[in-house]
Amino acid sequence: MMKPADYIEMKIPAKPEFVGVTRLTLSGIASRMGFSYETIEDLKIATSEAITNAVQHAYKGEEGEVLIGFGMHSDHLEVVVSDNGKSFDFYETKKALGPYNDQSAEFLREGGLGLYLIETLMDEVKVHQNEGITLFMTKYLERERVERDAETIST
Amino acid sequence: MNISIDVQERDHQTTITLAGEIDAYTAPKLREAAFPYTEKQHANVVIDLSGVTYMDSTGLGVFVGLFKSLNANEGTLELNGLSDRLKRLFDITGLADIMNINPKAEGGI
């Protein structure tokens, strides 16, 4: 993996009131890198979903911390969210998720859209599961993305 | 990084006006404040989201919960004043086809 040009890390208590604090930091970092308003909003949602998952599933009432790392590369931002709690089974959880299809109202799920949103809003998502869960989420700067896609098409 | 919740009841309709951010911290507050209004028979709940600056899946979860409760009690739920950002969340999750949502009016007079 490429070493980022700059790296920022923060550690928050695994409590819902700190998810918004991380969003503020992320906004600053992404705007410094030149991401558009729309993409920054996508990044905020994906990152919040990852932290919310860690806060709600990993520790279940116990004290804990969530580590958030921002790897600033020239053409992309990598957001790493890591917990070391007793994690939920990521792949089992993911299987049950996805967008809503036409369903009668009584069968609609009330949660579990977070991982689906992460995958929809980020360009790449990787998961590392051992003691806890670490999510690696990548978003490319728009102009770089266009060039990358163009290369793929021409070859 | 907080939410304000204003509830008005008039002519068999409950209007809930929200402003601020809906996330893991504020979603439980919203659920707690709004849920009682969905449990009456034939309740009509209108939620104004035009002041909501951020929302993620925790907010979607609350609206799905309110929607289910209202349906079970033969009531209705209407979500008004959605920004393009919020509308997009309902679109990509498939909820736009299931729930009654109305985007923010363009321009304005």
Image (spheres, coloured by chain):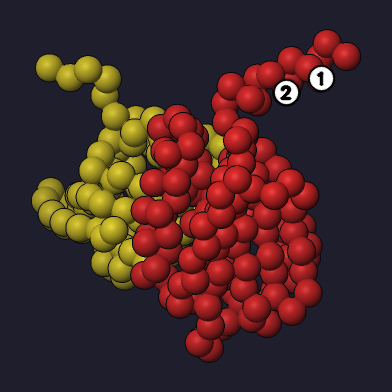
**Which quarter of the picture shows residue A16?**
bottom left
Could you say where residue A19 lies in the image, as x and y percent from the top left? 42, 63
Look at the image and tell me whether residue A86 can be seen: yes
Q: Chain B appears what colour? A: yellow
- Where A145 falls versus A79 (above or below)? above
Could you say where residue A138 lies in the image, as x and y percent from the top left? 65, 44
Q: Residue at x 77, y 49 (%)?
A: A1
Q: Mark 1 Cα within 10 Å, few/some/many (few <14, many 20+)?
A: few
Q: Residue at x 74, y 59 (%)?
A: A127
Could you say where residue B39 lies in the image, as x and y percent from the top left? 33, 65
Q: Mark 2 Cα within 10 Å, few/some/many (few <14, many 20+)?
A: few
Q: Chain A appears what colour? A: red
| SS label for mark 1 | helix
Q: Residue furthest top?
A: A154
In this figure, which residue is indicated by the disc labeled 2?
A: A148
Q: Residue A84 got which mark?
A: none
Front residue of A100/A152: it is A152
| CB-based contact (under 8 Å), mark 2 and mark 1 | yes
**3D distance between C-alphas at marks 2 and 1:** 6 Å
In this figure, which residue is indicated by the disc labeled 1?
A: A152
Q: Residue at x 37, y 61 (%)?
A: A21
> Which amino acid is tagged 1?
Thr
Chain bearing tag 1 is: A
